[in-house]
Amino acid sequence: MYLTSFIHRDQLLDIAERWFCGHLHGDDALRLTQILICDGFVLAETLESLTKNLLHRTHNGPILQKRVHLKGELREAICRRGEEAGPRAKELFEWYRKNPDFYYREAPIDGVMCLDGKGQLIGVYRVKRARRIAEKANRKIANWVFSLVQKKAEQMAAERARRFGVPLELLLTPEPEMTSEFVEAERAIAQSFIEGSFKFDRDALTINDVGGIKIVADDQRLVNLESALDEDPKIQVLHKESFYGPYRAKSLVLECPWDPEHVFRKYKESQCWERYLNRGIPEAELRMGLESHIRDPQPTISVELILSNFPDLVESELGDSIHEERIIAQRDNKVYEGYIPMNVEFLLEYLFAVGFSPQIRIDRLPIKLWGRYLPDTLISHVRRLYELPEHDLFY
């Protein structure tokens, strides 16, 4: 789980790697809390500055901002921008108005809409929610672990072929034996977690889109913006990908610097410390600023930039490529379904829950990658972090 939108991504990766091996340090909970406060604030401020920079290159006039918490708010704003709507968009608007609750209106989003002087949507930036980060990290880690298990199973098959004195490609293995070898290989990988010898492949587990921006403009302005970014000395375009079919857009991964002076000043001027009072850190310490909690930060962060024209935006939010349907498809399209990937997701969700909770110290890790758990187990331990009752019917 290498989150390139975080300035303490190496430290977060180190904690996650140790937790996957069952190794807890006494100050892990406190450090997680500090990282999520600092990195979240740095990311939000950098996203705001970068989004304004990009929008000034594609739109003239004032830019208004409005915080959004539910996808319904975003979709209502899209429907209000009707002057550019073609027949297909108008059709989708009509369907939406007839049954808005069918369109995942209550889906949470941690974002900001950017509006022009007429109040029409021209962009949005958001920070991916912790649950979505855990899901995405789970898919990456699960696929990577699955490849390791497959490789181990193939090594076991090769050894069996050697014992029989036949080439591997001519080895005939009954289905029950293949299943048994895969289970044994999975146990071997789990044992490497127990022994603490497991190491992440950073490249395979990198996530670049914890911070995301979407710019909405006509095709020519988007082309001009992309060309300008290629020549910008302060921004590096790390990756480009175009999507065709039901979902149409262009994705760019940008690496850009963050401004410590601006971030530290904004934190104090806006009294942002007040929003972190329930995170277990004393108020007096929070008032002092972020400086004491930022240790060996990376000088740059990476964010995903989506370039979209208005018709494609409408299709992605109300049409055949609606965002939530793509998320559900990703959840259902699992290559590896075993207890290890489920535990990966549980452990990552618990990691974020600790960082957001009032607890700055925990005495044990309730989830182990080599154990077996139900979702109720995770829910119970998260409730304990917030000192919430279990609401049992039996007393």
Image (cartoon, helix red, strand yellow):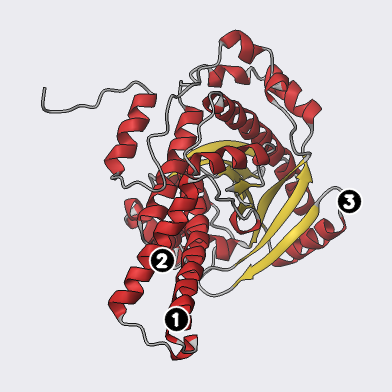
Residue found farthest to the top? 284
Q: CA distance from mark 3 to mark 2?
A: 40 Å
Type of amino acid under label 1: Arg
Tell me where residue 61 appears, x and y as whole percent: 75, 44
> Callout 3: 10 Å neighbours few (<14), some, many (20+)?
few
Measuring 57% from the left and 10% from the top, which residue is drawn there?
A: 283
Give the residue at mark 1: 163
Could you say which is closer to the camera, residue 217 or residue 286?
Answer: 286
Give the residue at mark 3: 233
Give the residue at mark 2: 333
Could you say which is closer to the camera, residue 326 or residue 313?
Answer: 326
Question: Considering the numbered disc 3 on the image, is that residue within a helix, a strand or a loop?
Answer: loop
Location of residue 112 with respect to 386 vertically, above or below: below
Location of residue 42 with respect to 102 vertically, above or below: above
Tell me where residue 290 appears, x and y as whole percent: 69, 22
Which one is closest to the eye, mark 3 or mark 2? Answer: 2
Tell me where residue 72 appears, x and y as whole percent: 43, 46
Q: CA distance from mark 1 to mark 3?
A: 60 Å
